[in-house]
Amino acid sequence: MNQEFEILLVAPMGLEAELADEAREQGFAAPQVITGGVLIQGSWRDIWRANLVLRGCSRVLVRIGSFRVGHLAQLDKLAHAFPWQSFLRAGSPVSVEATCKKSKIYHSGAAAERISKALQDVVGAKIDDNAALAIKVRIERALCTISIDTSGEMLHKRGHKEAVGKAPMRETLAASILRRCGYKGQETVVDPMCGSGTFVIEAAEMALGLQPGRNRNFAFEYLPSWNEAEWTKLQTHMPLGASEMCFYGSDRDAGAITASKANSTRAGVSAVTHFECKPITALRAPPGPPGLVICNPPYGTRIGDKKPLFDLYASLGKTLQQNFKSWRVGLVTPDSSLAKATGLAFAPPGAAILHGGLRVYVFQSKIEE
Ligand SMILES: C[S@@+](CC[C@H](N)C(=O)[O-])C[C@H]1O[C@@H](n2cnc3c(N)ncnc32)[C@H](O)[C@@H]1O
């Protein structure tokens, strides 16, 4: 239980620094940014907590061992000598995924097959591609590293979004983009093209101090290291409606608003969210001090003709300049010419973020008084 492991917190591409920042804030020691994620050291308790509380994390992988290997016969032998029984229950269903990079073992399928055989022989594992538990094997040059994916379904699946609109954003991306825009749960957030309500619901949950993993199960529950009593102690239950703030979403599409309301209710934040069907031209700042407008307008290859998009972005910029004096703006788009069409003065965007197969940027601005 107190054994220490290297833990990889997988991040959406481009949002590694935001995840490291969040991990530090949540009390995980010395998070180290690497490509694709953040490394920390910790115990099983840290692994459970990372899954439960980190909004910007896609998966939590625990490294359970590594060895040097040069060819398949050696992999077979070393995999049979690996202490699987310390980490898995006898007869557990597991899937096995292998990747090979710059290694003499270049056939990942053959590597996965050797590991699967060892798992069957040593702990009677049942190899099943749909198993809740996944063993990840990475062979880079002569080093074979074995990890368990402790999350199961990816962590953007919070367990309360059933209804989705067009091009929904993953919750993990939305949370880290809010963080990049300086949002820490203490100001009003408005999303005028809210789709299924992802930004608004994430912002509301952050303000209420809700744990993102409160409504779902995790793969680590199938491991012998899991201790239900200790796990229960990690879960906090905040009184709902404790925030004085409100979080606003609107969209011109009535279906999107129905979806947002349903998702917000399932997430338990409907008391602090407000969704309305209206176009951006009808958008006005809500009462109270200025906050953050976050927006992920339509873009991309699905929309062939860009002309209406330029008009849409220009209209968004005009509405914000007229009605949102002193508010901050975060605009998520892959296209700097569309961002420019808003007429807003943006700071240089930070690192590109991979979203729906595209590299998107967060253009940030502050509307002058
Ligand atoms: C890329 S989607 C936003 C997805 C959203 N971030 C989510 O996670 O579901 C863009 C949204 O902009 C909305 N939209 C397009 N033109 C609009 C307009 N003129 N006024 C308001 N909403 C508009 C679309 O209906 C669509 O839901």
Image: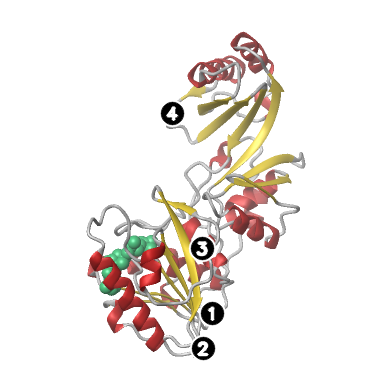
Residue type of the residue flagged with mark 3: Ile
Give the CA distance from mark 2 to mark 1. Answer: 8 Å
Q: Which callout, 3 or 1, points at the residue further toward the start of the chain?
A: 3
- Ligand 1 quadrant? bottom left
Q: Are marks 2 and 4 in contact (CB under 8 Å)?
A: no
Which structural element holds mark 2?
A: loop
Q: Which callout, 4 or 1, points at the residue further toward the start of the chain?
A: 4
Tell me if residue 224 can be seen.
yes
Residue labelled with disc 4: 129
How far across and down, in percent of the image, does residue 31 sit? 71, 52
**Residue 85 or residue 263, whichever sits in front:** 263
Give the CA distance from mark 3 to mark 1. Answer: 15 Å
Residue labelled with disc 2: 289
Q: Are marks 2 and 3 in contact (CB under 8 Å)?
A: no
Which structural element holds mark 1?
A: loop
Residue type of the residue flagged with mark 2: Pro
Question: Would you call the spot at circle 1 few (<14 residues within 10 Å), some (14-19), or many (20 or more)?
Answer: some
How far across and down, in percent of the image, does residue 215 sit? 48, 56
Give the CA distance from mark 2 to mark 3. Answer: 21 Å
Q: Quadrant of the N terminus?
A: top right
Question: Would you call the spot at circle 4 few (<14 residues within 10 Å), some (14-19), or many (20 or more)?
Answer: few
Which structural element holds mark 3?
A: helix
Residue labelled with disc 1: 187
Q: Which callout, 2 or 4, points at the residue further toward the start of the chain?
A: 4
Q: Which callout, 3 or 4, points at the residue further toward the start of the chain?
A: 4
Give the CA distance from mark 3 to mark 4. Answer: 33 Å
